[in-house]
Amino acid sequence: MLVGLTCLNQLFEVTIRSMDKRLNLLYAIPLGLAFVTFLLSSDILFTAGAFLAGLGILYLIRGRFLPPHVDRAARLFRSGRLQEALVAANAAIEARPESWEGYYVRALTYYDLHQLDDAAADARRAIELKPEEATNHAILGQVYYWQNRYDEAQLSFAKAAELNKRDPMNHYWLGATLFQQGEYGRAIPRLELAAGLKMPNPQLELLTFYYLGTALEAEGHVEDAQFPFKKMAKLDKVFAALEQDVRRAPESPGLPRLRQDVTAIRRRLTHMGAEPG
């Protein structure tokens, strides 16, 4: 990933998991037909025939759920085979340029390849094709965030959060963006929402509580800030992994800010008597 944080990859897993679920529903067709046939007939040959018929139906309607090559591109992306994923995403777009999924997966792939301008272009195209898909806005926000284009990142994350209020990542990234802009008052409710929802990774929890506590402190709510800071101290054992990930990360315009935040977390944990990782 661009910043070397494994946890960031989970932001993009949401839509790919959704693609997988749609494929899994399709795979149920031959199994379902075979099961019903066996219940009705108890005949192995009829059951096998029903299964083959189901496979035929699966093949015919599969393209209506996902454009050709998209599921392959998504799986290659998840396994880290980025150049192969790029080839598959290109094939998906060529086969069906009017479908947003190919552009979305290619945007993710370009992002992981650190080709941010290409990632942004594909994310914008995916938004044009399906503006109601929250993760299209989220990937564009990611690109802007790591380019230090916070005004544009804020708009993208705000739209993602509006479209999918239940995803803590949308609130986290909007809150983190507002924090980096010094808009602590506006960052607080977003970070509180993220902290109240189930975060996918303890490293993200650590960052969330740091940003929330620091924002509350900056707004003069010193007593209220102690709660997220205490939560942060309980996560001191994950700090080493966060620090290591940031140390290994390739350079990007937004990375120095993250390094500063990680240094500040270390100071805060040490001051509170915790032992960072």
Image: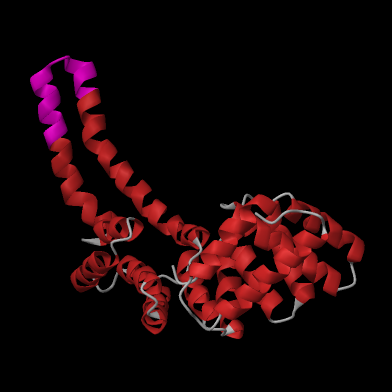
- Asked whether residue 212 is drawn in magenta, I would say no
Q: 56 or 90, which lies in front?
A: 90
Whole-percent x, y for residue 126 in the image: 38, 73
Q: Quadrant of the N terminus?
A: bottom left
Q: Tell me which residue sits at (37%, 80%) in the image.
A: 115
Q: Quadrant of residue 72?
A: bottom left
In the picture provided, is 188 more to the left or to the right than 170? right
Q: Tell me which residue sits at (23%, 51%) in the image.
A: 62
Q: Is residue 254 visible?
A: yes
Residue 245 sits above or below residue 43 on the image: below
Q: Tell me which residue sits at (58%, 61%) in the image.
A: 242
In the picture provided, is 60 more to the left or to the right than 183? left
Q: Quadrant of residue 155?
A: bottom right
* Number of numbered markers: 0
**Magenta span main SS:** helix
Residue 67 sits above or below residue 97 on the image: above
Q: Quadrant of the C terminus?
A: bottom right
Whole-percent x, y for residue 53 in the image: 13, 36
Whole-percent x, y for residue 249 in the image: 48, 71
- Asked whether residue 41 is drawn in magenta, I would say yes
In the picture provided, is 80 more to the left or to the right than 130? left
Residues shaded magenta: 36-52
Whole-percent x, y for residue 189 in the image: 75, 65
* Colour scheme: secondary structure
Residue 190 sits above or below residue 274 on the image: below
